[in-house]
Amino acid sequence: MSESVDQPVLSEMPLNQLIACHECDLLMHKPVLRKDEKAQCPRCGYELYAQRHNVVNRSLALVLTALLLFVPANFLPIMQLHLLGQTSEDTVWSGVLGLYNSDMRGIAVVVFLCSMAIPLLKLTCQLAVLLSIRLNVGRSYGLFIYRIYHHVRDWGMLEVYLMGVLVAIVKLVDMAQLTIGLGLVCFVGLLLVQVWLEVVMSPHQIWVALSGEDVHAGD
């Protein structure tokens, strides 16, 4: 269910009762939503925020799933290459080491940061934030960590790395025998779980819960 925001008189209203549209910058009164409702901008129709049910518990489940997939996604073989009687196995980590040992250390560092370090940092930040809300401890630290998460979230580029892997598979399939490894399955699963997590983990509800205004964020 969605709800369009009406435009009341905004003069002398407290700032915590106002919200600005991220798309068209319309300033409006922030509505109070019930569960499974969402607020939309009356001018451009952009979704301002939503009130999703059981946000913390569902997000925690997805974060833990992503962390479980992280190790096999990066250290199990993505594919096996059979060429002229020889077999080689490639992983994300071996790709980083291969670039580093080939005197392409700058590229190796970028690949390591964008495909391994920053995604792990993002998941760790999300886990810490959700636990601070779920256990009701250290919410001030949770606010700080959530700010860090929003600064680094755009630097994790798993989808770019996946596109590179798929392009390599398409180019090599006519030259050698390729076998898809379990690492690629886990990598795709990790990417899908993180996309799902971005949808479920409503930023508005997380900010409100961290500020102590919403004691029912985990319901």
Image (cartoon, rainbow, N blue to C red):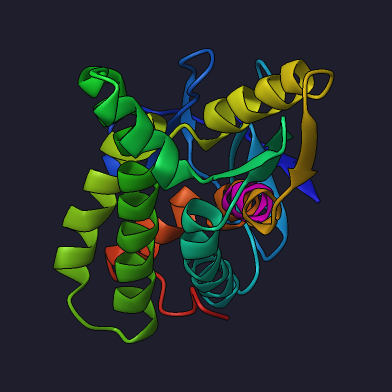
**Camera-nearest residue between 37 and 70:** 70
Residue at figure coordinates x 36%, y 54% from the top left = 120
Is residue 116 found inside the magenta-colored segment of the image? no
Q: Residue furthest right?
A: 174
Residue 44 screen position, x and y as percent: 67, 16
Residue 68 screen position, x and y as percent: 52, 71
Is residue 193 found inside the magenta-colored segment of the image? yes
> Looking at the image, is 154 positioned above or below residue 126?
above
**Camera-nearest residue between 122 and 182:** 182
Residue at figure coordinates x 27%, y 35% from the top left = 151
Q: Residue furthest front?
A: 85
Q: For the magenta stretch, what is the residue range?
A: 187-194
**Camera-nearest residue between 42 and 142:** 142
Residue 7 screen position, x and y as percent: 56, 27
> Looking at the image, is 155 positioned above or below residue 107?
below
Is 43 displayed left or right of 153 in the figure? right
The image shows a total of numbered marks equal to: 0
Look at the image and tell me whether residue 213 can be seen.
Answer: no
Residue 55 screen position, x and y as percent: 56, 68
Name the main secondary structure of what is drawn in magenta: helix
Residue at figure coordinates x 67%, y 43% from the top left = 79
**Camera-nearest residue between 173 and 112:** 173
Is 140 displayed left or right of 46 in the figure? left
Look at the image and tell me whether residue 132 can be seen.
Answer: yes
